[in-house]
Amino acid sequence: MAAERSGSLAHAHPSQPQRSLACFPDPLREDPALESFLREASARLCQWWAGSAQRSPLPLLSVLPEPGPLQQGLSPEALLEDLQLVMDGAYNPIHPGAMAHLDPPPLTASVAADLVCAGLNNNLLAEELSPSLSRLERSLTTWMAEQLGLGESAGGVAASGGSLSNLMALVVARHQAGLAEAQGLTVFCSADAHVSIAKALMVMGLPKQSLQTIETDAEGRLSPDALAQALKDAERDGRRVLAVVATAGTTVRGAVDPLASISDLCRLHGVWLHVDGAIGAVFGLSQSHKQLVPDLDRADSLTVNPQKLLGITKTSSLLLLKRPELLASCFGTGLPYMEPSWADAHGGECGLQGTRPAEILKLWLGLRQLGLDGIESLLHGALQRRAELQQHLSALPLMLRSGPLHLLAFTPSALEAHEAERWSIQTRQQLLEQQLMLSRPLYAGRHHLKAVLGNPHTRSSDLAAVASVIQQSLAPA
Protein backbone atom coordinates (compact mmCIF):
# COMPACT_ATOMS: atom_id res chain seq x y z
CA MET A 1 0.00 0.00 0.00
CA ALA A 2 1.35 3.41 -0.92
CA ALA A 3 2.41 5.61 1.98
CA GLU A 4 0.53 8.78 2.86
CA ARG A 5 1.93 12.12 3.91
CA SER A 6 0.20 15.29 5.00
CA GLY A 7 0.41 18.53 3.11
CA SER A 8 1.28 20.29 6.36
CA LEU A 9 4.39 18.11 6.66
CA ALA A 10 5.28 18.29 2.98
CA HIS A 11 5.74 22.06 2.88
CA ALA A 12 5.06 25.12 4.97
CA HIS A 13 2.89 27.89 3.58
CA PRO A 14 4.38 31.38 3.77
CA SER A 15 2.90 33.36 6.63
CA GLN A 16 2.67 36.49 4.46
CA PRO A 17 1.63 36.44 0.81
CA GLN A 18 4.59 37.10 -1.47
CA ARG A 19 2.35 38.23 -4.32
CA SER A 20 -1.30 39.11 -4.54
CA LEU A 21 -3.63 37.20 -6.83
CA ALA A 22 -7.10 38.42 -7.65
CA CYS A 23 -9.77 35.90 -6.79
CA PHE A 24 -11.69 36.70 -10.00
CA PRO A 25 -10.59 37.77 -13.49
CA ASP A 26 -10.71 41.50 -14.06
CA PRO A 27 -13.37 42.44 -16.64
CA LEU A 28 -11.74 45.81 -17.42
CA ARG A 29 -8.03 45.14 -17.89
CA GLU A 30 -5.38 42.49 -18.26
CA ASP A 31 -4.02 41.07 -15.05
CA PRO A 32 -0.25 40.40 -15.17
CA ALA A 33 -0.31 38.58 -11.82
CA LEU A 34 -3.02 36.21 -13.06
CA GLU A 35 -1.17 35.61 -16.32
CA SER A 36 1.99 34.83 -14.37
CA PHE A 37 0.13 32.43 -12.08
CA LEU A 38 -1.43 30.54 -14.99
CA ARG A 39 1.90 30.40 -16.82
CA GLU A 40 3.59 28.97 -13.74
CA ALA A 41 0.84 26.39 -13.23
CA SER A 42 1.15 25.39 -16.90
CA ALA A 43 4.93 25.21 -16.59
CA ARG A 44 4.66 22.86 -13.62
CA LEU A 45 2.27 20.64 -15.55
CA CYS A 46 4.64 20.56 -18.52
CA GLN A 47 7.51 19.67 -16.19
CA TRP A 48 5.38 16.90 -14.67
CA TRP A 49 4.74 15.53 -18.14
CA ALA A 50 8.38 15.82 -19.17
CA GLY A 51 9.54 13.85 -16.13
CA SER A 52 6.92 11.13 -16.45
CA ALA A 53 9.27 8.48 -17.82
CA GLN A 54 11.49 8.84 -14.74
CA ARG A 55 8.61 8.10 -12.35
CA SER A 56 6.60 4.93 -11.93
CA PRO A 57 3.10 4.83 -13.45
CA LEU A 58 1.80 4.17 -9.95
CA PRO A 59 3.19 6.82 -7.57
CA LEU A 60 5.20 5.74 -4.56
CA LEU A 61 3.29 8.25 -2.45
CA SER A 62 -0.41 8.71 -1.83
CA VAL A 63 -0.40 12.29 -0.62
CA LEU A 64 -2.88 13.78 1.80
CA PRO A 65 -2.99 17.57 1.47
CA GLU A 66 -4.69 19.77 4.02
CA PRO A 67 -8.35 19.46 3.05
CA GLY A 68 -9.79 22.74 4.27
CA PRO A 69 -9.01 26.43 3.82
CA LEU A 70 -6.96 28.37 6.32
CA GLN A 71 -8.26 31.54 7.93
CA GLN A 72 -6.55 33.65 5.28
CA GLY A 73 -6.38 32.75 1.61
CA LEU A 74 -3.06 31.52 0.26
CA SER A 75 -0.55 33.38 -1.84
CA PRO A 76 0.08 32.32 -5.45
CA GLU A 77 3.31 30.63 -4.36
CA ALA A 78 1.53 28.59 -1.73
CA LEU A 79 -1.27 27.67 -4.12
CA LEU A 80 1.29 26.41 -6.62
CA GLU A 81 2.97 24.36 -3.91
CA ASP A 82 -0.40 22.82 -3.05
CA LEU A 83 -0.86 21.94 -6.71
CA GLN A 84 2.63 20.44 -6.85
CA LEU A 85 1.89 18.24 -3.84
CA VAL A 86 -1.15 16.73 -5.50
CA MET A 87 0.73 16.29 -8.79
CA ASP A 88 3.52 14.43 -6.99
CA GLY A 89 1.02 11.81 -5.81
CA ALA A 90 -0.96 11.50 -9.03
CA TYR A 91 -1.31 8.44 -11.24
CA ASN A 92 0.99 8.80 -14.24
CA PRO A 93 -0.75 7.85 -17.52
CA ILE A 94 2.02 9.49 -19.60
CA HIS A 95 4.55 6.80 -18.63
CA PRO A 96 5.29 4.31 -21.44
CA GLY A 97 4.70 1.48 -18.98
CA ALA A 98 1.16 2.63 -18.13
CA MET A 99 -0.80 -0.25 -19.65
CA ALA A 100 -3.25 -1.04 -16.87
CA HIS A 101 -6.38 0.91 -17.65
CA LEU A 102 -8.46 2.72 -20.25
CA ASP A 103 -6.84 6.02 -19.34
CA PRO A 104 -4.45 7.19 -22.06
CA PRO A 105 -2.30 10.32 -22.01
CA PRO A 106 -4.32 13.50 -22.62
CA LEU A 107 -4.35 15.27 -25.95
CA THR A 108 -2.58 18.59 -25.58
CA ALA A 109 -5.33 20.54 -27.38
CA SER A 110 -7.90 18.89 -25.13
CA VAL A 111 -5.96 20.06 -22.08
CA ALA A 112 -5.96 23.63 -23.40
CA ALA A 113 -9.68 23.41 -24.15
CA ASP A 114 -10.29 22.17 -20.59
CA LEU A 115 -8.60 25.29 -19.24
CA VAL A 116 -10.60 27.56 -21.54
CA CYS A 117 -13.79 25.66 -20.67
CA ALA A 118 -13.16 26.40 -16.99
CA GLY A 119 -12.31 30.00 -17.74
CA LEU A 120 -15.42 30.61 -19.82
CA ASN A 121 -17.51 28.90 -17.14
CA ASN A 122 -20.43 28.55 -19.54
CA ASN A 123 -23.33 26.32 -18.55
CA LEU A 124 -24.95 23.99 -21.08
CA LEU A 125 -28.15 24.07 -19.07
CA ALA A 126 -29.56 26.62 -21.53
CA GLU A 127 -28.57 28.46 -24.71
CA GLU A 128 -28.58 31.86 -23.01
CA LEU A 129 -25.82 30.56 -20.71
CA SER A 130 -23.79 28.99 -23.53
CA PRO A 131 -25.02 30.25 -26.91
CA SER A 132 -22.18 29.02 -29.12
CA LEU A 133 -21.25 25.94 -27.09
CA SER A 134 -24.83 24.65 -27.03
CA ARG A 135 -24.91 24.83 -30.81
CA LEU A 136 -21.50 23.16 -30.97
CA GLU A 137 -22.72 20.27 -28.83
CA ARG A 138 -25.72 19.67 -31.07
CA SER A 139 -23.68 19.85 -34.26
CA LEU A 140 -20.81 17.70 -32.99
CA THR A 141 -23.06 14.96 -31.61
CA THR A 142 -24.90 14.98 -34.94
CA TRP A 143 -21.59 14.63 -36.79
CA MET A 144 -20.44 11.82 -34.52
CA ALA A 145 -23.74 9.94 -34.85
CA GLU A 146 -23.64 10.23 -38.62
CA GLN A 147 -20.00 9.08 -38.76
CA LEU A 148 -20.94 5.98 -36.78
CA GLY A 149 -23.81 5.17 -39.13
CA LEU A 150 -26.85 6.21 -37.12
CA GLY A 151 -28.11 8.49 -39.89
CA GLU A 152 -28.35 12.17 -40.81
CA SER A 153 -31.17 12.83 -38.36
CA ALA A 154 -29.36 11.22 -35.43
CA GLY A 155 -27.79 13.15 -32.58
CA GLY A 156 -27.34 13.12 -28.86
CA VAL A 157 -25.96 14.72 -25.76
CA ALA A 158 -22.66 14.84 -23.89
CA ALA A 159 -22.58 13.21 -20.48
CA SER A 160 -20.26 12.94 -17.52
CA GLY A 161 -19.07 9.38 -18.16
CA GLY A 162 -20.31 6.21 -19.81
CA SER A 163 -22.26 5.11 -16.76
CA LEU A 164 -24.49 8.15 -17.09
CA SER A 165 -24.83 7.65 -20.85
CA ASN A 166 -25.94 4.05 -20.30
CA LEU A 167 -28.40 5.09 -17.60
CA MET A 168 -29.96 7.78 -19.78
CA ALA A 169 -30.27 5.34 -22.68
CA LEU A 170 -32.29 2.91 -20.58
CA VAL A 171 -34.46 5.69 -19.16
CA VAL A 172 -35.24 6.83 -22.71
CA ALA A 173 -35.98 3.24 -23.74
CA ARG A 174 -38.45 2.88 -20.89
CA HIS A 175 -40.09 6.23 -21.58
CA GLN A 176 -40.54 5.80 -25.33
CA ALA A 177 -42.10 2.36 -24.78
CA GLY A 178 -44.63 3.79 -22.31
CA LEU A 179 -43.25 1.65 -19.50
CA ALA A 180 -42.41 4.37 -16.98
CA GLU A 181 -44.91 3.00 -14.47
CA ALA A 182 -44.59 -0.67 -15.43
CA GLN A 183 -43.32 -3.32 -13.06
CA GLY A 184 -41.68 -6.64 -13.83
CA LEU A 185 -39.45 -5.26 -16.57
CA THR A 186 -36.46 -7.19 -17.90
CA VAL A 187 -33.19 -6.06 -19.45
CA PHE A 188 -30.95 -8.56 -21.21
CA CYS A 189 -27.20 -8.08 -21.53
CA SER A 190 -24.05 -10.11 -21.91
CA ALA A 191 -22.54 -11.83 -18.88
CA ASP A 192 -19.51 -9.61 -19.60
CA ALA A 193 -21.47 -6.35 -19.81
CA HIS A 194 -20.20 -3.39 -17.82
CA VAL A 195 -21.30 -3.02 -14.19
CA SER A 196 -22.92 0.31 -15.05
CA ILE A 197 -25.88 -1.57 -16.54
CA ALA A 198 -26.75 -3.13 -13.19
CA LYS A 199 -26.20 0.23 -11.52
CA ALA A 200 -28.55 1.92 -13.99
CA LEU A 201 -31.39 -0.46 -13.17
CA MET A 202 -30.82 0.11 -9.48
CA VAL A 203 -31.11 3.89 -9.98
CA MET A 204 -34.25 3.33 -12.07
CA GLY A 205 -35.85 1.53 -9.13
CA LEU A 206 -35.85 -1.89 -10.74
CA PRO A 207 -35.04 -5.00 -8.68
CA LYS A 208 -31.85 -6.98 -9.21
CA GLN A 209 -33.68 -9.78 -10.99
CA SER A 210 -34.68 -7.34 -13.71
CA LEU A 211 -31.20 -7.72 -15.20
CA GLN A 212 -30.84 -11.08 -16.94
CA THR A 213 -27.38 -11.94 -18.22
CA ILE A 214 -26.89 -13.99 -21.37
CA GLU A 215 -24.07 -16.48 -21.75
CA THR A 216 -21.09 -15.68 -23.96
CA ASP A 217 -19.23 -17.79 -26.48
CA ALA A 218 -15.56 -18.76 -26.37
CA GLU A 219 -14.65 -15.31 -27.71
CA GLY A 220 -16.54 -13.48 -24.96
CA ARG A 221 -19.43 -12.41 -27.23
CA LEU A 222 -23.10 -12.55 -26.29
CA SER A 223 -24.72 -15.68 -27.72
CA PRO A 224 -27.57 -14.82 -30.13
CA ASP A 225 -29.05 -18.30 -29.72
CA ALA A 226 -29.20 -17.89 -25.95
CA LEU A 227 -30.69 -14.42 -26.36
CA ALA A 228 -33.32 -15.72 -28.78
CA GLN A 229 -34.41 -18.34 -26.23
CA ALA A 230 -34.44 -15.78 -23.43
CA LEU A 231 -36.66 -13.43 -25.45
CA LYS A 232 -39.03 -16.27 -26.26
CA ASP A 233 -39.19 -17.27 -22.61
CA ALA A 234 -39.93 -13.68 -21.56
CA GLU A 235 -42.70 -13.43 -24.15
CA ARG A 236 -44.17 -16.73 -23.03
CA ASP A 237 -44.11 -15.68 -19.37
CA GLY A 238 -45.66 -12.29 -20.09
CA ARG A 239 -42.60 -10.34 -18.96
CA ARG A 240 -42.02 -6.97 -20.66
CA VAL A 241 -38.50 -6.55 -22.02
CA LEU A 242 -37.28 -3.00 -21.58
CA ALA A 243 -34.11 -3.33 -23.67
CA VAL A 244 -31.28 -5.50 -24.84
CA VAL A 245 -27.83 -4.08 -24.11
CA ALA A 246 -25.06 -5.23 -26.43
CA THR A 247 -21.41 -4.36 -25.88
CA ALA A 248 -18.87 -3.12 -28.41
CA GLY A 249 -15.71 -3.68 -26.39
CA THR A 250 -16.05 -5.57 -23.11
CA THR A 251 -14.04 -4.37 -20.13
CA VAL A 252 -11.57 -7.24 -19.70
CA ARG A 253 -10.98 -8.63 -23.18
CA GLY A 254 -12.50 -6.12 -25.60
CA ALA A 255 -15.03 -8.51 -27.13
CA VAL A 256 -17.62 -7.14 -29.54
CA ASP A 257 -21.09 -8.66 -29.47
CA PRO A 258 -22.65 -9.72 -32.83
CA LEU A 259 -24.78 -6.63 -33.30
CA ALA A 260 -26.50 -7.65 -36.54
CA SER A 261 -27.91 -10.88 -35.11
CA ILE A 262 -28.87 -9.18 -31.85
CA SER A 263 -30.57 -6.36 -33.76
CA ASP A 264 -32.59 -8.82 -35.83
CA LEU A 265 -33.88 -10.39 -32.61
CA CYS A 266 -34.72 -6.99 -31.13
CA ARG A 267 -36.68 -5.99 -34.22
CA LEU A 268 -38.51 -9.31 -34.22
CA HIS A 269 -39.63 -8.80 -30.62
CA GLY A 270 -40.04 -5.01 -30.74
CA VAL A 271 -37.28 -4.37 -28.18
CA TRP A 272 -34.97 -1.36 -27.86
CA LEU A 273 -31.31 -2.10 -28.65
CA HIS A 274 -28.74 -0.09 -26.72
CA VAL A 275 -25.07 -0.59 -27.56
CA ASP A 276 -22.51 0.20 -24.88
CA GLY A 277 -19.64 1.23 -27.15
CA ALA A 278 -17.75 3.13 -24.47
CA ILE A 279 -14.57 1.23 -25.33
CA GLY A 280 -14.92 0.21 -28.94
CA ALA A 281 -17.26 2.57 -30.77
CA VAL A 282 -14.46 5.01 -31.66
CA PHE A 283 -13.09 2.37 -34.04
CA GLY A 284 -16.16 3.13 -36.13
CA LEU A 285 -14.61 6.51 -36.97
CA SER A 286 -11.86 4.76 -38.96
CA GLN A 287 -12.36 3.61 -42.53
CA SER A 288 -9.63 1.00 -41.99
CA HIS A 289 -10.88 -0.38 -38.68
CA LYS A 290 -14.64 0.15 -38.54
CA GLN A 291 -15.13 -3.50 -39.52
CA LEU A 292 -13.93 -4.37 -35.99
CA VAL A 293 -17.17 -2.89 -34.63
CA PRO A 294 -19.63 -3.64 -37.44
CA ASP A 295 -23.32 -2.78 -37.45
CA LEU A 296 -23.25 0.09 -34.96
CA ASP A 297 -25.91 1.58 -37.23
CA ARG A 298 -28.34 -1.06 -35.97
CA ALA A 299 -28.45 0.51 -32.49
CA ASP A 300 -31.35 2.61 -31.23
CA SER A 301 -28.92 4.24 -28.82
CA LEU A 302 -25.15 4.14 -28.51
CA THR A 303 -22.67 5.12 -25.80
CA VAL A 304 -19.30 6.44 -27.00
CA ASN A 305 -16.42 7.43 -24.70
CA PRO A 306 -13.69 9.30 -26.64
CA GLN A 307 -11.75 9.65 -23.36
CA LYS A 308 -10.85 5.94 -23.31
CA LEU A 309 -8.61 5.84 -26.38
CA LEU A 310 -8.53 9.17 -28.20
CA GLY A 311 -7.02 11.04 -25.25
CA ILE A 312 -9.86 13.50 -24.71
CA THR A 313 -9.50 14.74 -21.14
CA LYS A 314 -12.02 13.43 -18.65
CA THR A 315 -14.85 13.36 -18.82
CA SER A 316 -15.92 12.81 -22.39
CA SER A 317 -18.87 10.56 -23.09
CA LEU A 318 -21.69 10.85 -25.60
CA LEU A 319 -25.11 9.27 -25.73
CA LEU A 320 -26.17 9.08 -29.38
CA LEU A 321 -29.64 8.17 -30.63
CA LYS A 322 -31.24 7.61 -33.99
CA ARG A 323 -34.10 9.74 -32.71
CA PRO A 324 -32.49 12.43 -30.55
CA GLU A 325 -35.83 14.15 -30.05
CA LEU A 326 -36.62 11.37 -27.59
CA LEU A 327 -34.19 12.95 -25.13
CA ALA A 328 -36.30 16.08 -24.70
CA SER A 329 -39.57 14.15 -24.67
CA CYS A 330 -38.17 11.99 -21.87
CA PHE A 331 -36.23 14.50 -19.76
CA GLY A 332 -37.93 17.79 -20.60
CA THR A 333 -39.51 19.38 -17.53
CA GLY A 334 -39.53 22.98 -18.67
CA LEU A 335 -37.18 25.69 -17.43
CA PRO A 336 -39.55 28.52 -16.47
CA TYR A 337 -36.72 30.58 -15.05
CA MET A 338 -34.94 30.70 -18.44
CA GLU A 339 -35.71 32.33 -21.76
CA PRO A 340 -37.28 29.90 -24.28
CA SER A 341 -34.93 27.57 -26.12
CA TRP A 342 -33.69 28.68 -29.52
CA ALA A 343 -33.82 25.06 -30.65
CA ASP A 344 -36.16 22.18 -29.80
CA ALA A 345 -35.08 22.10 -26.15
CA HIS A 346 -32.49 23.43 -23.76
CA GLY A 347 -29.48 21.23 -23.07
CA GLY A 348 -30.65 20.80 -19.50
CA GLU A 349 -33.83 19.18 -20.80
CA CYS A 350 -32.02 16.61 -22.94
CA GLY A 351 -30.60 14.47 -20.17
CA LEU A 352 -30.35 13.91 -16.44
CA GLN A 353 -27.80 16.67 -15.89
CA GLY A 354 -28.97 20.23 -15.55
CA THR A 355 -25.90 22.34 -14.96
CA ARG A 356 -23.21 21.01 -17.26
CA PRO A 357 -19.73 22.29 -18.08
CA ALA A 358 -18.87 22.75 -21.75
CA GLU A 359 -17.07 19.42 -21.98
CA ILE A 360 -17.91 19.33 -25.66
CA LEU A 361 -15.18 21.96 -26.20
CA LYS A 362 -12.33 19.61 -25.32
CA LEU A 363 -13.76 16.87 -27.51
CA TRP A 364 -14.18 19.25 -30.43
CA LEU A 365 -10.72 20.81 -30.14
CA GLY A 366 -9.08 17.43 -29.54
CA LEU A 367 -10.66 15.97 -32.68
CA ARG A 368 -9.65 19.08 -34.63
CA GLN A 369 -6.07 18.57 -33.45
CA LEU A 370 -6.00 14.90 -34.43
CA GLY A 371 -7.82 15.09 -37.72
CA LEU A 372 -9.12 11.90 -39.29
CA ASP A 373 -5.57 10.80 -40.07
CA GLY A 374 -4.57 11.25 -36.44
CA ILE A 375 -7.55 9.22 -35.25
CA GLU A 376 -6.58 6.51 -37.72
CA SER A 377 -3.00 6.53 -36.46
CA LEU A 378 -4.01 6.25 -32.79
CA LEU A 379 -6.32 3.32 -33.46
CA HIS A 380 -3.80 1.55 -35.68
CA GLY A 381 -1.03 1.96 -33.12
CA ALA A 382 -3.17 0.52 -30.32
CA LEU A 383 -4.05 -2.53 -32.40
CA GLN A 384 -0.42 -3.04 -33.44
CA ARG A 385 0.76 -2.99 -29.83
CA ARG A 386 -1.88 -5.53 -28.80
CA ALA A 387 -0.87 -7.82 -31.68
CA GLU A 388 2.81 -7.46 -30.78
CA LEU A 389 2.29 -8.32 -27.11
CA GLN A 390 0.01 -11.19 -28.04
CA GLN A 391 2.72 -12.57 -30.29
CA HIS A 392 5.25 -12.38 -27.44
CA LEU A 393 2.92 -14.27 -25.10
CA SER A 394 1.46 -16.81 -27.52
CA ALA A 395 4.25 -19.32 -26.96
CA LEU A 396 3.85 -19.28 -23.18
CA PRO A 397 1.52 -21.57 -21.19
CA LEU A 398 -1.18 -18.93 -20.84
CA MET A 399 -4.88 -18.63 -21.51
CA LEU A 400 -5.09 -15.49 -23.65
CA ARG A 401 -8.34 -13.55 -23.57
CA SER A 402 -8.78 -10.92 -26.23
CA GLY A 403 -11.08 -9.67 -28.94
CA PRO A 404 -10.61 -7.54 -32.03
CA LEU A 405 -9.65 -4.40 -30.11
CA HIS A 406 -6.63 -3.25 -28.07
CA LEU A 407 -7.13 -5.18 -24.81
CA LEU A 408 -5.37 -8.40 -23.86
CA ALA A 409 -5.85 -10.40 -20.65
CA PHE A 410 -4.05 -13.60 -19.71
CA THR A 411 -3.69 -16.13 -16.91
CA PRO A 412 -1.54 -19.27 -16.50
CA SER A 413 -3.35 -22.26 -17.98
CA ALA A 414 -1.81 -24.80 -15.58
CA LEU A 415 -2.74 -23.11 -12.30
CA GLU A 416 -5.82 -23.50 -10.14
CA ALA A 417 -7.86 -20.39 -9.41
CA HIS A 418 -6.27 -19.74 -6.00
CA GLU A 419 -2.81 -20.22 -7.50
CA ALA A 420 -3.64 -17.83 -10.35
CA GLU A 421 -4.63 -15.20 -7.79
CA ARG A 422 -1.28 -15.51 -6.01
CA TRP A 423 0.56 -15.46 -9.34
CA SER A 424 -1.27 -12.32 -10.45
CA ILE A 425 -0.37 -10.45 -7.25
CA GLN A 426 3.29 -11.42 -7.34
CA THR A 427 3.74 -10.87 -11.06
CA ARG A 428 2.02 -7.49 -11.03
CA GLN A 429 4.43 -6.39 -8.31
CA GLN A 430 7.39 -7.64 -10.33
CA LEU A 431 6.14 -5.64 -13.30
CA LEU A 432 5.73 -2.51 -11.18
CA GLU A 433 9.32 -2.87 -10.01
CA GLN A 434 10.27 -2.36 -13.65
CA GLN A 435 7.80 0.54 -14.03
CA LEU A 436 5.40 -1.59 -16.05
CA MET A 437 1.80 -1.41 -14.88
CA LEU A 438 -0.89 -3.93 -15.80
CA SER A 439 -4.22 -4.40 -14.05
CA ARG A 440 -5.42 -7.53 -12.28
CA PRO A 441 -9.08 -8.26 -13.12
CA LEU A 442 -11.11 -11.22 -11.93
CA TYR A 443 -12.63 -12.82 -15.02
CA ALA A 444 -14.37 -16.17 -15.53
CA GLY A 445 -13.58 -17.12 -11.94
CA ARG A 446 -9.84 -16.54 -12.28
CA HIS A 447 -7.49 -13.62 -11.75
CA HIS A 448 -5.81 -12.37 -14.91
CA LEU A 449 -3.31 -9.71 -15.79
CA LYS A 450 -4.63 -7.26 -18.37
CA ALA A 451 -2.84 -4.94 -20.74
CA VAL A 452 -4.61 -1.99 -22.35
CA LEU A 453 -2.49 -0.93 -25.30
CA GLY A 454 -3.91 2.52 -25.98
CA ASN A 455 -0.87 4.44 -24.68
CA PRO A 456 0.94 5.86 -27.73
CA HIS A 457 4.16 6.18 -25.70
CA THR A 458 4.42 2.42 -25.09
CA ARG A 459 7.37 1.06 -27.08
CA SER A 460 8.25 -2.35 -28.45
CA SER A 461 10.94 -2.58 -25.76
CA ASP A 462 8.25 -2.11 -23.08
CA LEU A 463 6.18 -4.92 -24.55
CA ALA A 464 9.23 -7.18 -24.70
CA ALA A 465 9.97 -6.34 -21.07
CA VAL A 466 6.43 -7.31 -20.05
CA ALA A 467 6.79 -10.61 -21.87
CA SER A 468 10.14 -11.25 -20.17
CA VAL A 469 8.68 -10.75 -16.70
CA ILE A 470 5.74 -13.00 -17.55
CA GLN A 471 8.03 -15.70 -18.88
CA GLN A 472 10.16 -15.62 -15.74
CA SER A 473 7.05 -15.79 -13.55
CA LEU A 474 6.04 -19.04 -15.22
CA ALA A 475 9.44 -20.70 -14.92
CA PRO A 476 9.64 -23.67 -12.53
CA ALA A 477 10.89 -22.71 -9.08
Image: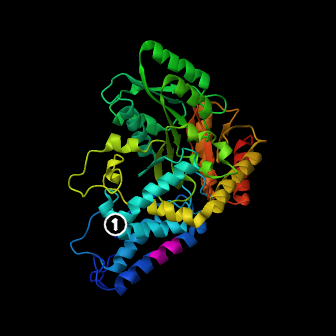
Outermost residue to the right:
395
* Image location of residue 447, percent across then percent down: 58, 37
Residue 170 in view: yes
Residue 90 in view: no
* Image location of residue 264, percent across then percent down: 58, 28
Residue at 57%, 25% in the rendered image: 215
> Which residue position holds label 1?
121
Residue 176 sits above or below residue 156 on the image: above
Residue at 32%, 43% in the rendered image: 331
Q: Which type of secondary structure does the marked residue at label 1 adopt?
A: loop
* Image location of residue 8, percent across then percent down: 33, 69
Q: Considering depth in this image, is 423 or 123 the residue closer to the camera?
A: 123
Residue 68 sits above or below residue 403 on the image: below
For badge 1, the amino acid type reads Asn
Q: Considering depth in this image, is 80 or 275 the residue closer to the camera?
A: 275
Q: Considering depth in this image, is 431 or 162 the residue closer to the camera?
A: 162
Q: Is residue 224 left or right of residue 359?
A: right
Q: Is residue 87 left or right of residue 102?
A: left
Residue at 62%, 34% in the rendered image: 419
Bounds of the magenta segment: 42-48
Taking the magenta stretch, the answer to whether it contains residue 389 is no
- The image quadrant of residue 219 is top right
Taking the magenta stretch, the answer to whether it contains residue 43 is yes
Q: How is the image coloured?
A: rainbow
Q: Considering depth in this image, is 308 or 269 the residue closer to the camera?
A: 269
The image quadrant where one finds the C terminus is top right
* Image location of residue 286, percent across then percent down: 65, 52
Q: Is residue 99 left or right of residue 471?
A: left
